[in-house]
Image: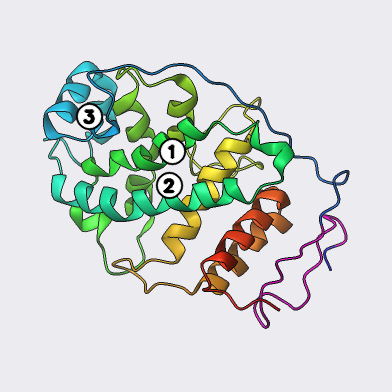
Amino acid sequence: MCGKLGMEIARPLGVGGINRYINIGRSNYGINFGNNLKADTFENNSIDRFTTEPAIKRMIAANPKIKNIVKNFNPQLDLNMAELQELLQNHASETGHIAAGIVENLPFSLHSKVDTKAIKDASYLHDLGKVLIPKEVLNKPAKLDAVETKIMHTHSELSYELLKNSGLNEKTLNLIRNHHQNAKKTGYPWVSNDFRADLDLQILSVADKYSALTENRAYKEAMTPKQALTIIYQDVKDEKLHPFIFRALVNYANTTEKVSVA
């Protein structure tokens, strides 16, 4: 039992199954939600319009800040298009699928607060900036050192800067920039004191994290859904993630029949 959050789990997550009937008190958790929606326009209606090599080169040319961000690790602005396409077909698509599953499992009262289009677009484009991260960092088969970690952490800001002048709405752009942030503001990149991790951002962030944990990477093997949920549950205890969203993720995981239910 986690008394502070009003969440009850039949057995510890690291030992037993995941209980789909998690009880959450409505009045004892302080993370609030908010939403905003604008229109987005560009060359056509397909989200893939942002992911072609010509489009990315135009984005770089339109924003000098990008060259400044990568000057110490990719001064030639080399584009890893093969890595980007693999990422879009796998991790980005899976993140969108998980995010949609979380939304489906939210309490009905929250459905009207979700900007599904912004989440869908941001899920697909959130790692676009990795096209500028060197292969030796992106695919290192070991833990990154401090310098490499700093380079890797630029990818979310690079995604934002690449897309900033593309015509995407501000809601989607901010989701992309801040998908590694949380309600405690302990993630990256830097955010101001008035930053608030709203419902949409928390859905995208946890979908991205669950996808990353449950897939093979150059530096790790895929975790089981139960192992991934155990790690993410710590974010709930640390008040980085709203328990309603975690419960929705657990229920989504149970519908995939990958998690044993107590």
| CB-based contact (under 8 Å), mark 2 and mark 1 | yes
Dot placed on the residue nearer the N-terminal end, 2 or 1: 2
Looking at the figure, which quarter contains the C terminus? Answer: bottom right
Image location (x, y in percent) of residue 107: 71, 46
Secondary structure beneath dot 1 equals: helix
**Taking 97 as reference, is 91 left or right?**
left
What residue is disc 3 on? 49
Q: Which residues are magenta?
A: 3-23
Q: CA distance from mark 2 to mark 3?
A: 17 Å
Q: Specify few, some or many for label 2: CA neighbours under 10 Å numbering under 14, 14-19, or 20 or more.
A: many
Secondary structure beneath dot 2 equals: helix
Residue for point 31% across, 17% down: 165
Q: Is residue 29 visible?
A: yes
Residue for point 36% across, 66% down: 143
| CB-based contact (under 8 Å), mark 1 and mark 3 | no
Three-letter amino acid code at the position of disc 3: Arg
What residue is disc 2 on? 96
Three-letter amino acid code at the position of disc 2: Gly
Q: CA distance from mark 2 to mark 1?
A: 6 Å
Residue for point 77% across, 63% down: 22
Dot placed on the residue nearer the N-terminal end, 2 or 3: 3
